[in-house]
Amino acid sequence: MAKIPMKTPLVEMDGDEMTRILWQQIKDELLLPYIDLKTEYYDLGLPMREQTKDQITIDAANATKQYGVAVKCATITPNAQRVEEYNLSQMWKSPNGTIRAILDGTVFRAPIMVNGINPVVKNWKQPITIARHAYGDVYRDTEFRIPCTGKAMLSFLSDDGAVQMNQTVYDFECPGVVQALYNKDDSIRSFARSCFQYAIDTKQDLWFSTKDTISKKYDHTFKDIFAEIYEAEYRAKFEALGITYFYTLIDDAVARVIRSQGGFIWACKNYDGDVMSDMVSTAFGSLAMMTSVLVSPDGNYEYEAAHGTVTRHYYKYLKGEETSTNPVATLFAWTGALRKRGELDGLAELSAFADKLEQATIATIESGVMTGDLVGLWEGDAPAVKTNSVDFLKAIRANLDKLL
């Protein structure tokens, strides 16, 4: 059949290690045979980030603002061990943190539910969507290793010199560490509006949680801005739809989430959302079974896999050993981006292809064919058949051809 045409390119951000291998396998097996794929390619693999002094990451984020839709592979955020392994000149920042800072949006992550794989939390009947603020916090922090005794200070000086604040953080009597985080009212407002609007669009209740009783300025600002915007702009819309907005402390929220049946959006600050999205996805099945999209206030979308680069499998792959790495989250990053590109460009055929590719993927798992991470979770009627990554993609393609 003729390949499905595209008008506007996707911004394609390649990544690292095993997910980089899967990235190309997905393109070769499930995309290029069916789509006249147009992308603006950026290699965000760690060697290229080192070579360009991370300018490639900034360029990819700006290209997303230009083209409107991006798809991103998992990437390495280097620690000290990675600096040595890759002979880096410095410990580069998280690429996701850089991209999110430039786009200033909210990350929405939801589990991919499959019949035969039941949540670990047995009362969860519907997906729980994590809305993660994608700006600031520890991902853009400033931190020091304190080498000796002395006083750590937090200070602020306004541009006109009229406002000056100084506060002692701690009098160090021995070596230690100090860290400063920041956020902006404008970004918090964008986060709140994105969450409220997403709740309206999907007709789901919205929960929001921080630790404002301990963080009386930082976290309390989040709480206050959410409350202000809800009352002024969204209460009437929520009540008309019969949905609710609920605020509670994050420790209370965790307990409530575990006891719930799901079916709501849980909004979290940046770090909280990072941790809780992993918890929710694992409890629903696997880290590789979760969609993730960054939505910016000005209508840009970046789809990515919510998990890491699967380093352990990559080392096996380099030895020539067979791997059974789950490609579903990476594949759904592609389908999400293709669907959105189709919607924005008026290409119904492209969006329909993305839908069918997701259906084929779920049908493959429900038939009992799956990667190793899912075998131990399988409770379906068909016997579970563990397959390697390439054969799993081929099985998806066979089901896709039936749908097409």
Image: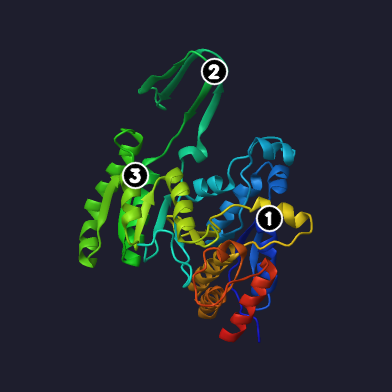
Q: Which mark is residue 175?
A: 2
Q: Amino acid at mark 3?
A: Ile
Q: Secondary structure at mark 1?
A: helix
Residue drawn 24% across the image and 62% down it? 237
Q: Secondary structure at mark 3?
A: helix
Q: Quadrant of the N terminus?
A: bottom right
Residue drawn 58% across the image and 61% down it? 373
The reply to whether residue 134 is in sight is no
Q: Is residue 250 above or below residue 182?
A: below
The tag earlier along the polypeptide, 3 or 1, is: 3
Q: Quadrant of residue 33?
A: bottom right
Q: Give left or right: position of 189 versus 299.
A: left
Q: Quadrant of residue 5?
A: bottom right
Q: Which mark is residue 250?
A: 3
Q: Which mark is residue 313?
A: 1
Residue 339: x %, y % from top left:
51, 71
Nearer to us of marks 3 and 1 is 1
Residue 151: x %, y % from top left:
47, 15
Label 1 – label 2 distance at C-alpha: 38 Å
The tag earlier along the polypeptide, 3 or 2, is: 2
